[in-house]
Amino acid sequence: MLVCDDLVIEILSWLPVKSLVRFMHASKSLNSFISDLSFVKLHLERSPKNAKLLIECFVVPMYNFFVSCDIPSLLDNTIPFALYVKHWETLCFVTEILQGLVCLVNRHCRINDLAFYSVNLWNPATRKTFGSNNWKFILEIDTYPAFGFGYDNLSNTYKVAAFLPNNSYLQSSNESYVLTATTYESCWREIECFPTAAAHILNEGVYIHNTLNWLGSTHGTNKPRSDDIKFDELNIISLDLGNETYTQFLLPRALYGFRLSDFYNLNNYICEPITIGVVKDCLSLFLQNCTNNHFSLWQMKEFGDQKSWTQLVNILVPDLEFCDIWNTVNLVPLCTFEDGHIFMVQSHCQLQSFVFFYRGSLTTTERPKVPCSISWICPLDYVESLVSFDHNLETYFP
Amino acid sequence: MAEETESTKTEPLKTAEEEFKKLEITEEEESELKLETSDHVTFMVEASIAMKFGAVQQYLEVSPAASASATAIPLHNVASRELILILEYYRMHDWVDAGERDLKEFDERFLKDLNYEELKELLLAANYLNVEKLFNFLTKSIANIIRNKDVEFVRTFFGIDNDYTPEEEAAYREENAWAGVKFV
């Protein structure tokens, strides 16, 4: 008995990517069904959310690889060893994972005072990497751009943004570039300048609501040290991917008057006292105070409305029973479950991570069952997808 | 088959008011609809269940008189064997006292009793009737059956003709060896 095409598509849309890659060569028509954009979208919609993490592992300096694992195996400490192996011998960092695509930026210094950057989009599930010579660029070695990766719903394209900060010694403009990653020919375009006169950017771009968001200080160059920055001088700088213009949002008023240095433990500069991210579809601030041992979480309930900042969590760390490692870790929220949150605590010292939960009321936590044996730097929420590009873009890194 | 349980199919209730409304509806809808399958068997089905079938709703929109009259609503692409299964599924899933575990056990048993051909027939019937819950349950279950199988199984299962040349297939296999069934 034959099952008609529509029904086959419905059935296939529930399958993991690995099975689909295998079934693609059942026939040419099935292959074109699975490669079709509408199927890729349907499959992405149905791919389990908040189920997997992509962990960037770190073996020896300049040599890293990635592991994808599901949450239960993380908790049981049965992480499969190097499922998605990909390693580079040059410095490489992940800016964001979106729809199963990882944006990798590779920095390579071949000539003394020049740094070569190349941008690649990698789909770990299909094991394909996409890139183009036109996506590369060269900068002076002491310029460190801030990157962001997002999907523009208006043009239905992936965009990578790079912003070249003002160097405090060399007077340069706040140039800002966008790459629309569609074809081999597409290349970096200059867009409106980054809005702040002299910005000090604290993170990679965070994607939410068709925008990329950075946390930055508007008075960067006036201050000799970044920890001297006041919270009222910090802004969220938001790039709308549709019209490629910037807007800025203020931080919650309750934070005004404090300085970043108020949040540092003077003996320890390891923790980032403030980071931004996305929790439950809202732009969120994570504040880790190492002097009074508080952790707080703020959310901008209505994106773009500065008055909608709401404090969701404010806890004294001894409650969490991990004050012993508090000064050496960063709390990074990873997944949001139906019933609460999971936070990952990263330690930069021993390159070890611990898992903590905040469930329901967000006031309780559990001791990690097992500190995981894998050293990682960058665990990220990850959804498997079939997202792909033109064959011309398929490339072998770098 | 149609008269196996008392019709106690109210959904979990939120407010007293809602509860009241629900009671009214169930009382009112103790009425049944007459459905006729492709093999000319007629079924008296509780309206609350029959109205979950998109095909029935559509029929009644066109000819509303059928709900009150004794005319049977024809289901051209559903045989009595499938309709019995579909009713069994919906009666269980509508049963207010059924816990999550009961439903899980029921679903497992439901699947175990079906062979591949029956499963496909049932999927076609569910598709024709336009019953979302069962349709999703069936497509997911079939996906689970095939997910770790090889290409040959999938071809036979769906009746797909292989139009690749042996060379093309070998090249594809080599390129995507990592996705091969033996690594699952």
Image (cartoon, coloured by chain):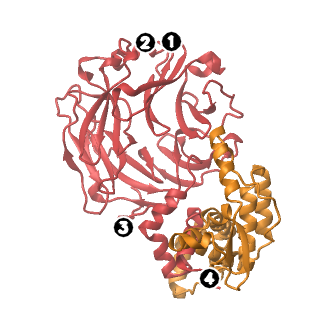
Chain letter of mark 1 equals A
Q: Residue at x 57, y 74 (%)?
A: A7
**Which residue occupies the foreground of this view, A187 or A339?**
A339
Q: Secondary structure at mark 3?
A: loop
Q: Is residue B67 left or right of residue A41?
A: right
**Which residue occupies the foreground of this view, A238 or A194?**
A238
Q: Report x, y in % for residue A390.
A: 36, 67
Looking at the picture, do discs 3 and 1 lie on one chain? Answer: yes
Residue assigned mark 3: A390
The chain painted orange is: B
Q: Residue at x 62, y 63 (%)?
A: B52
Q: How far, Cα to Cα, is label 1 from label 2? A: 7 Å
Residue A355 at least partly seen: yes
Q: Which mark is residue A291?
A: 1
Q: How far, Cα to Cα, is label 3 from label 1? A: 52 Å
N-terminal label among 1 and 2? 2
Q: Colour of chain A?
A: red
Q: Secondary structure at mark 2?
A: helix
Q: Secondary structure at mark 1?
A: loop
N-terminal label among 3 and 2? 2
Q: Count neighbours of disc 2 (C-alpha within 10 A) and say few if under 14, some if 14 to 19, many if 20 or more.
A: some
In front: mark 3 or mark 4? 4
* Dot 1 and dot 2 residues touching (CB under 8 Å): yes
In front: mark 4 or mark 2? 4
Chain letter of mark 2 equals A
Residue assigned mark 4: B76
Q: Which mark is residue A262?
A: 2
Q: Is residue A103 left or right of residue A77?
A: left
Vertical comparison of A7 with A55: above or below: below
